[in-house]
Amino acid sequence: MTDRSSARIDVRDLSLSYGKVNVLQSLSLPIERGKITVLAGPNGCGKSTLLRAIRRLHKPTSGGIYLEEVDISRLGDKALARQIGLLAQSPSAPEDMTVEELVRLGRYPHQSMLQPWSPDDASALESAMSGTGVSSLRQRRLGSLSGGQLQRVWIAMVLAQQTDVVCLDEPVNHLDMAHQLDCLDLVRQLKNAFGRTVVLVLHDLNLAARYADHLVFLRDGAIAASGSPEELMTEANIARVFDVNAHVITDPVHHRPLCIPLSTARQASA
Amino acid sequence: MTVNIKFSGPPLTVPSATRQRPPTPAIYAGLLVALCAVMLVSISVGYRIYGLDQVWQALTAFDGSETAVVIANLRLPRAVIAPLVGAGLGVAGVLVQTLSRNRIASPDTLGLNAGASLGVVIASFWFGVGSMTGLSLAAALGALATSVLVFAIASSAGGLSPIRIVLIGVTFAGLGHSLVEVVLTTNEAQLSQLLFWLSGAFVDRPLALAQTGGPIIAIGGALALLLARPLDALQADDATATGLGVPLFLVRGLSFLAVSLLTGAAVSMAGPVGFIGLVVPHAARWLVGLRHGRLIPAAALIGAIYATLADVIARFVVYPTEAPVGAITAVVGGVVLLVLLKRRAA
């Protein structure tokens, strides 16, 4: 792999609205280099919007996102795409596209009219496919893959992009338990073996606690709590952020906090 | 229990669902040879069949004989215009299907053929245009105007989403066709001439049309090739394409421009010939895969072969008279499309 130190993102006083609806309100969040930051929160809390804003898919109403002290709104499309990669929520591509054709797309921001396909592109393609274990699938059509294989191929595409920062929007949403673990192990691999900074939106709190280095709880477009999984996963926080009465224990195998939901606490607010 | 870093899981090699293709240069060479062959057939075969020596004689040393006149003035223009139109519509079809992320879309789906027909009818009835060149120009303008309108309306509410493009295109197609019907039924005098034009054909078109249409097709094709890599990325969803650094609006706008140049020029030469833009991209993908850098040249060649072949077949199905070429492209295309869809499903 190329030797590069991971970048650090700083979200500063970010507000964002769709029309008249405020989705994010003066939100500030430093994202640490070379760590997995997991954004979690109830439906509609703005976690996906924050992730998409970090990748400049949404324009902030005020405030901004800084990558190594550079405002990302000043970067060109391709320059930004060489710095921050995105695995979108439920991404789609034609069913008859081959695995290799999809992973190649990751090289788009590194190419230009004068430099259509370089040895760098070829080696990035190969290392992304071998790093995710999809090399043997290269001629397979996407439509013939299982959900788990497909997700791995999409991660390979983002890996081929060779960005310092990788954003993943609910990557395990439609996967069964084995493939969820498989996918998140792979995400951890992005950090450990490839030194990437990872920002991840996850729904499942226990998976979040297991894989996060840094956990962020959002609620109503603002940060409700932020810290290590051990600090954040308290019964009080879970009740406050998710409206769920829960019991929190320490997972005896991984020694991470584990949440056992007991009942919904919504009766009062409903 | 340890976390396995080399991922466990289902076996990753299943031999089915892959396809080994011959190398791309070999495919192009094969298509090029096939194109030359059908063009030669188109010149020499028809109501009368000429030998290659007579064809050579007529094209190199025109002697004013009946044979030479038929070959140079009737057969040659068809053998030049048909492949140009086919190539243009084939490439336009690839662009439209990628833009709309819809494999059964075609330039017709965007309402471009309807726009071209409307242009012809308006020019003929309101401005008294009667010459072939004038009607061709009107057709091209109609296609261009329609594509500008569809593009403007589709992008006005932001987004330019594939589904909006298709919905607005289909609406315009329906609107255009019904306006054409209205004008035609109220003006029966010029009906026969216009009906001929509106059916789409390669017969009796002057070679001069290719002198303006050809370069426009070339420009549209070159523009399409320049867009090849962003179009590859546009096959994925919008968020993914943006994440890769593709300027969606710019790429879609330029693709629209290429589609209208290609379709406008094709319609100006042959009238609205359907089904080429729908079927050819499928055949091209089947041969060379989904990368536009390969797909666009392949679609141009296959479109050229297809249109020329259809034009030759049209001379024989109801021999000694000629069938409209649009009917042939539709019948052959429909069958080919069904076979392709069946194959993919299998």
Image (cartoon, grey):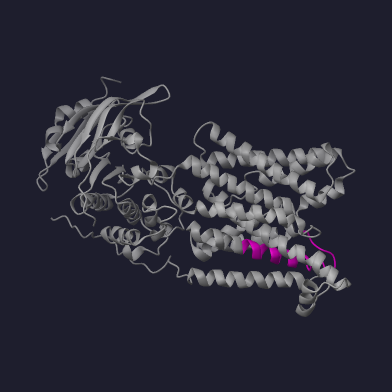
Residue placed furthest toward the right: B189
Specify start and end residues of the magenta stretch as a single range.
B302-324
Quadrant of the image containing the N terminus of chain B: bottom left
Residue A175 in magenta stretch:
no
Please state if A98 lies on the left or on the right of A260 as rendered: right
Residue drawn at x 28%, y 52% is A179
Q: Position of residue A262 (x, y in %)?
A: 19, 32
Q: In this view, does A137 lie above or below B259?
A: below
Q: Kindly indicate the quadrant of the structure image that contains residue A221.
A: top left
Q: Position of residue B320 (x, y in %)?
A: 85, 68
Q: Position of residue A112 (x, y in %)?
A: 42, 52
Q: Position of residue B215 (x, y in %)?
A: 65, 55
Can see residue B115? Answer: no
Residue drawn at x 76%, y 66% is B76
Residue drawn at x 73%, y 42% is B177
Please state if B96 lies on the left or on the right of A189 as rendered: right
Most foreground residue, A173 or A163: A163
Residue drawn at x 51%, y 70% is B25
Q: Kindly indicate the quadrant of the structure image that contains residue B281.
A: bottom right
Most foreground residue, A24 or B291: B291
Q: In this view, does B116 lie above or below B301?
A: above
